[in-house]
Image (cartoon, coloured by chain):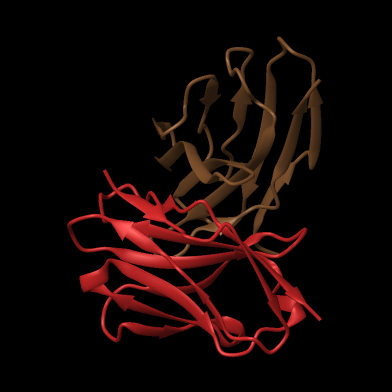
Amino acid sequence: DGGITQSPKYLFRKEGQNVTLSCEQNLNHDAMYWYRQDPGQGLRLIYYSQIVNDFQKGDIAEGYSVSREKKESFPLTVTSAQKNPTAFYLCASSTSPDTQYFGPGTRLTVL
Amino acid sequence: AQSVSQHNHHVILSEAASLELGCNYSYGGTVNLFWYVQYPGQHLQLLLKYFSGDPLVKGIKGFEAEFIKSKFSFNLRKPSVQWSDTAEYFCALYSGAGSYQLTFGKGTKLSVIP
């Protein structure tokens, strides 16, 4: 069964802690993306990776970090430097601009 | 820089009413345009897309959109909505910068009343 999985579905974090969100795909897509979704703000791009061992900052990369050691995995770390981390985080992948496939998302809440 | 504007934040319709959601973009070159839908509790999924050719594109579930280049618009339409169309709809643009980046609008929440 092909697709994108994100874990966990819900995540709670104390202020000052780093937290890592998982994103895995078995679609054999080269490109992967992380978006942040806030009510009334749409989707904003955090980071993207077009190929293994390479990634670029998106529009709102401050306070986040990523790695792309394997084609199928693109984890996102929300660091303590991110001032307003509570949000819904979406991972996507694509093989062309034709279609980005989205995961189910992780809702992060900072307590 | 490119941008996408969706004019309506929240639209409320009765079943069987016609739907038109506005989307305008800002970019001077060739664009590919998309509408995505997010049903409550479900993944964001592609509704329809325009790359080239016929400016009237048809998508899933009876939705269609028309690309009007002179107006920089890509409005989404459906002649008769159903309660199951209740969702959030996002317009997105790809400008061909080589990075497969999509620029999304802020979304329009559609509520259909039975």
Q: Is residue A66 above or below residue B58?
A: above
Q: Quadrant of residue B72?
A: bottom left
Q: Residue A81: x, y in percent?
A: 58, 13
Q: Residue at x 60, y 30 (%)?
A: A76
Residue A70 visible to an observer of this rendering: yes
Q: Residue B54: x, y in percent?
A: 29, 86
Q: Pick the quarter of the image with the C terminus of chain B.
A: bottom right
Q: Residue at x 52, y 28 (%)?
A: A67
Q: Is residue A33 above or below residue A104?
A: above
- Out of A107 and A94, give the one closest to the viewer: A107
Q: Residue at x 69, y 46 (%)?
A: A105
Q: Is residue A36 left or right of residue B56?
A: right
- Out of A45 and B17, give the one closest to the viewer: B17
Q: Residue at x 58, y 88 (%)?
A: B62
Q: Chain A drawn in what color?
A: brown
Q: Is residue A3 above or below residue B86?
A: above
According to the colouring, which chain is red? B
Q: Residue B69: x, y in percent?
A: 23, 72
Q: Quadrant of residue B51?
A: bottom left
